[in-house]
Image: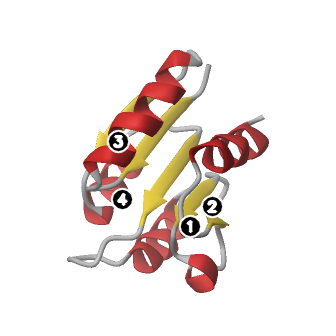
Amino acid sequence: MKNILLCTSDPILIKNLYGALRDEGHIVDTVEHPALAVQKVIDGTYDVLVLDSDPFGLSSEDAVQIIRSVKPALPIVCLGTGSRCSSAHAVDSPLDLAAIKRTVHAIAA
């Protein structure tokens, strides 16, 4: 069982990925914006951060840089951002739920 933080404002992704990870026995917290993800990571203990790109506010790339400075060992999966999150694992668009789950399992092992 892993403690996972899911950061996305996409309600379909939240419903599908949150449900799938919970069904596998993981604890999943959700936030809508990268700035909130940074705050939760600083205040909490997570095994993995799944970070969706967000066009408003703090960018996912900036959030990754901040989190790397505070918790460099935290595995991060960036969704739909390609190479822009170079210091994190990436799952490109179109998002595939199975690919996201495989990536989370591979880095959280």
- Find the distance from the CA under tag 1 to the CA under tag 2: 4 Å
- Find the distance from the CA under tag 1 to the CA under tag 4: 10 Å
Q: What residue is disc 2 on?
A: 72
Label 3 crowding class (10 Å Cα cut-off): few <14, some 14-19, many 20+? some
Amino acid type at mark 4:
Val
Residue 23 at x, y percent in the picture: 52, 17
Image quadrant in which the C terminus is located: top right
Foreground tag (4 vs 3): 3
For the residues labelled 1 and 4, say whether their Cβ atoms are less than 8 Å apart: no
Question: Which residue lies at the image location 50% right of the left edge and 70% below the top edge?
Answer: 64
On residue 14, the disc is: 3
Q: Nearer the viewer, residue 69 or 101?
A: 101
Disc on the earlier residue, 4 or 2: 4
Residue 32 at x, y percent in the picture: 25, 53
Q: In the rendered image of this protein, does residue 11 appear above or below residue 27?
A: below
Circle 1 SS class: helix
Q: What residue is disc 4 on?
A: 38
Image quadrant in which the N terminus is located: top right
Question: Which residue lies at the image location 41% right of the left edge and 70% below the top edge?
Answer: 63
- Find the distance from the CA under tag 4 to the CA under tag 2: 13 Å
Q: What residue is disc 1 on?
A: 68
Foreground tag (1 vs 3): 3
